[in-house]
Structure formats: C-alpha cells, structure tokens
Image (cartoon, helix red, strand yellow):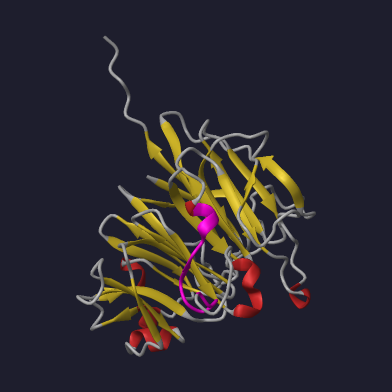
Amino acid sequence: MVLYATGFNAWSQLTFDPSPADEEPDDVFTFTKVLAARFVGLIASEMSYTAVQQDTSWAIAGSSPDQLLHREDNQVFLFDSPSAISGDGKVLAVQDSDCSPSNQVIVQYPSLAAWKASKSTDSWPCKASVRQITAYDAGFIIFLEDETVLSCGDPRFRDCLGREVDESCPANEPGIIQDLSDLGEPIKKIAAAGYTAAALTESGGLYLWGMAAPGSQSQHNVFQDISELPNYFEVDGDKDVQDIGIGESHAIALTTDGCIYVIGNNTNGQIGLGKDAQDPVSSWSKVDFTPPEGWAIVAVEAGPRSSFIVTKKVKQSQSS
C-alpha cells in the first residue's frame, strides 16, 4: 500500500524519509508519495506530526511529543486503541473495565501528560465497544460498534455537538446524536476538525454539522450552510461517498467511483491543487489524481492542514 500526502509541512510532518537536517521543510502543494508499506492503517495527523499505522508498528513524522504518546514502559501507544486529542489539548481514550456493559469505559484526560500519567478527570461506561473517536477544536465525537454516535465538548460551542443539550444530557458528557440514529441506515465512519464534524453512512451519504470558526481565527468557513444538527451534503451532484476526511478549514472525499474531491483552503497546499490555487475553493472540486495502473484508491484522511490518499494494489483477475 502507498500513502500520498499534501499540505502543511513546517515540522516535516509529511516527511517519513528524513532529508539532511539543514534542509528547510516546505509545504507540499500536490499529492506526493510519502510512505510505502505492506499495510497502511490508521492515520493520526496532528498539527506538528503524523502517526501512521504500518504493518505491525507506527511510523511517525514531524515534531511529535514522542515520550508523551507512550506509557507503561513504552508498551502502550496512544493510538493503539480508539483515542483523540482535541484542539484545546484534552485527550479522550478507551480503557478496559469490568464495570461496563461493553467491558470498556470512555476516559477523559486534561492533557497528553495526564494520559501518560494515567490521571483522568472523568470516565463514562459504554453500552457498546468503541469503534472510533475523533476530535474537533473543543470536543469529541465517539462512534460505537452498535453504530450509535455520541458527542461531548465545551458547552460554549454546542453547535458542534449535533444534539440537544440539557440538564439530563449536558455538553461535557457523551450524549447520543439522535438525528444520526434516526436516519434508518448504519453509520460507517465519523470525522471532525476545527468546528466541523461529519458522519458517513454505509450507503455513501455524507452528513455534516458544526459552526463557523470563532472570529479571531478567521478561517475560511468551508461549508456555508452548516448548522448545529446533522444535515445531508451532496458531493458533485449527489455522488455516493466512500470515505471522508475533515481538516481545520478543508475537507477531502473519496467517491465510490474512485474519484477524489476537495473543498476549502489551500493556503498550505492542504487540498493539493498546486501552489497557484491560493483562493479558497467553495464547492467540491475534483482532484486530478490517478494511481498507477493496477492500483486503486482505498481511503482518504485529513489532518488539520493536510490531506492523505491511501492506495492499494488490485489483485488481477485471471483471464480464462
């Protein structure tokens, strides 16, 4: 499998094969091959580093708080199990527990250092095992194996929660996003960053919710019609979406016909349209990316200011 990346690279967070130290890293403005491995799995992309699950280990590029990402004498790596780091530095992770119906609890830590020291501030039992946790700037979205989606976060940014908030279900405790449960079709992935969150259904429907970034951050508002509850968003005339990645002020989608679409900011090359494309892209734009013959695009992902494409060799069917 091969990983391609584009975007912000000030800390060499897209460079898995380091060049001489005296070379100043440049942002990458088109999708470029950065890693090859037999297997490429989870991509955890933070502002200054990228961790990629490859074969039986993790490849890390950039300036990572490496010691803080490991605990228990380096036996446990943060991203080995569902976990995420929010923009305000909190960590949400999963822990085994006999006191929960699913034998798992969701645990919150005030910082990465607190996670390493196992000093949590809150924990909640899960009614089902956790499949995925993703973070936005002020909170988290949680996806359970029973296809329930939960959210929790800073009550000042309740539009990012995608659900009603009241005394029985406060913002800072995981609560069910009922609108997604009511869709009548299973969810297969969640994504979030900045002040935007997304859920992708098994049939290829893309649902988004959130809010414009607070004024001082003045980031480009990628989805103009976004609101506090999940709404269906089309990609290029209602194409079915196979995978989705959400960045701080951009997004990348893989459609079921094998095409890549991007939207949003390209200031750091995060949507891969080249150095000349400096104006924000306000509608889904198809990227001219074709994998080598015999290879297929199987996944996409986004970091805060970067995008990733994963390709895989296609087994050739034997002709009779």
In the image, is residue 206 above or below residue 102? above
Is 212 colored magenta in this rendering? no
In the picture, measured across the screen, residue 56 lies left or right of residue 115, that is: left
Query: Which part of the image, by quadrant, shows the N terminus?
Result: top left
Rendered location of residue 299, percent (x, y): 46, 45
Q: Where is residue 222, by image quadrant?
A: bottom right
Could you tell me which residue is drawn at 78 percent across and 55 percent down? Answer: 278
Residue at image point 80% right, 54% down? 279
Splitting the image into 4 quarters, where does residue 104 fall? Answer: bottom left
Residue 305 higher or lower than 301, as above or below: below
Check the image and report above or below for 1 versus 109: above
Residue 149 in view in this figure:
yes
Task: Please name whichever residue, 234 or 41, is drawn nearer the observer in this view of the structure.
Answer: 234
Q: Residue 175 colored magenta?
A: yes
In this view, the residue farthest toward the front is 168
Q: In this view, does 57 lie above or below 122?
A: above
Identify the residue at horizontal 51%, vertical 46% (top origin).
Answer: 183
Span highlighted in magenta in the image = 169-180
Q: Could you say which is closer to the camera, residue 188 or residue 146?
A: 146
Where in the figure is residue 181, as x and y percent of width and height? 47, 53
> Residue drawn at (78%, 74%), measured in percent from left and top?
215
Between 179 and 74, the residue placed more toward the observer is: 179
**Image mark count:** 0
The single residue placed furthest to the top in the displayed view is: 320
Q: Judge whether residue 28 can be spotted in this image.
A: no
Q: Where is residue 36 in the image (x, y as percent from the top left)?
A: 38, 50
| Quadrant including the C terminus | top left
Within the image, what quadrant is residue 255 found in?
A: top right
Residue 209 location in percent, x, y?
A: 63, 58
